[in-house]
Image (spheres, grey):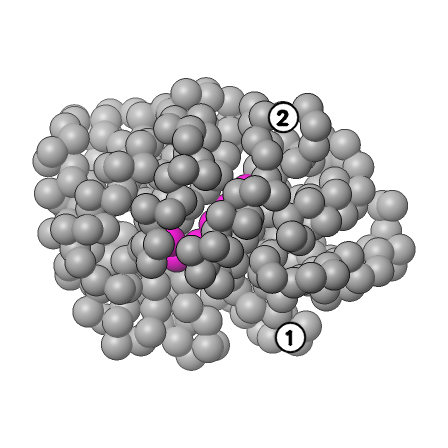
Amino acid sequence: MNSAANVGRVVKHGRIKQALARWCLHDMGEKWSVEKICQVAVQMGLPAIEVVPAEEFPLLKKYGLVSALTVSHMFVRGMNNPLHWEECLSKLGAAIDANADAGFSNVVTFTGFSDTTIPEGPGIARGSVVDREQGIKNCVEGYKKIVGHAEKKKAVLCLEPLNTRDGANMKGHPGYQGDHIDFCLEVIDKVGSPALKLLFDVYHVQIMDGDLIRRIPSLKGKIGHVQVAGNPGRGELDDNQEINFPPIMRALLDIGYDGYVGLEFIPVGDTMKSLVQAVQLLDV
């Protein structure tokens, strides 16, 4: 099942709107092109791609797909530090405008690392550590500078909690400040705008907080986007991992969630087979 041409429609119910994640799909370590991802999405019956830069919008439009989540700034330099506001606000603003022009909505955003001495990424501001309370205050102040524009453009900024327990590359992010869901929710509540919501990443939340199904009803109206991956390892949604996804999907439907669910897992086996398995599992 390695060829896109071999995949037929997988979605039967369609109550959960699924999206393929752009960055993590590969065959034997060779990344899929965006065009291949679009082709597979269409053939499987999926409406969207996620973690997409604006320059890929014409290709999505060609295939009649939606950008379920548009990229902006990265997770190291985020809104918890005023030293990074200029960069973050510029990239958020550009993503908001590009989405508005294309008819899309969601833009990803991050708190940033608390310890800016961590040598990750060029141009990182060094020499300061932001504590929890200051980080929340800075995020609130920073997001208030952009949510008015987002509201006007009918955009939703999706603030993502990331786990800090797994040190493997792209499986966790030690040093990230908004690692617990309550940190992100406090920021969202204090900003108080419909243009700032939670990115409920099931994989990250499971690692840091757990209690997924019981937590979901309290998040009614606050979730802007959902992502999934198997834990441990951010791998396939198979029986080698600990998360039971169908009842989580039903819990989301029970609170009226009608946004997208992004398949943001890193395949370790046959990628196409893993995608079919995941789509079928979530298609409750």
Give how far across and how far down residue 133 sits, in percent. 11, 33
Q: Of the residues shown, which amino acid type is indicated by label 2?
A: Gln
Q: Of the residues shown, which amino acid type is indicated by label 1?
A: Gly
- Dominant SS of magenta comes to strand
Q: Which residue is mark 2?
A: 241
Which region is colored magenta?
Answer: 223-228
Q: Is residue 258 above or below residue 271?
A: below
**Secondary element at tag 1:** loop
Q: Earlier in the sequence, mark 2 or mark 1?
A: 1
**Left or right of 106, for residue 194:** left
Nearest-to-viewer mark from 2 and 1: 2
Question: Which of the 4 image quadrants contains residue 215?
Answer: top left
Q: CA distance from mark 2 to mark 1?
A: 33 Å
Q: Nearer the viewer, residue 160 or 89?
A: 160
Taking the spot 51% from the left edge, 29% from the top edge, the residue there is: 171
Taking the spot 48% from the left edge, 63% from the top edge, the residue there is: 258
Give how far across and how far down residue 253 sits, in percent. 50, 56
Taking the spot 31% from the left edge, 32% from the top edge, the residue there is: 180
Taking the spot 26% from the left edge, 71% from the top edge, the residue there is: 151
**Left or right of 54, for residue 78:** left
Q: Which residue is mark 1?
A: 64
Task: Please say if the residues under marks 2 and 1 sit with CB atoms less than 8 Å apart.
Answer: no
Labels in figure, total: 2
How many C-alpha atoms fall within 10 Å of the one at disc 2: few (<14), some, or many (≥20)? some
How many C-alpha atoms fall within 10 Å of the one at disc 1: few (<14), some, or many (≥20)? few
Q: Is residue 225 magenta?
A: yes
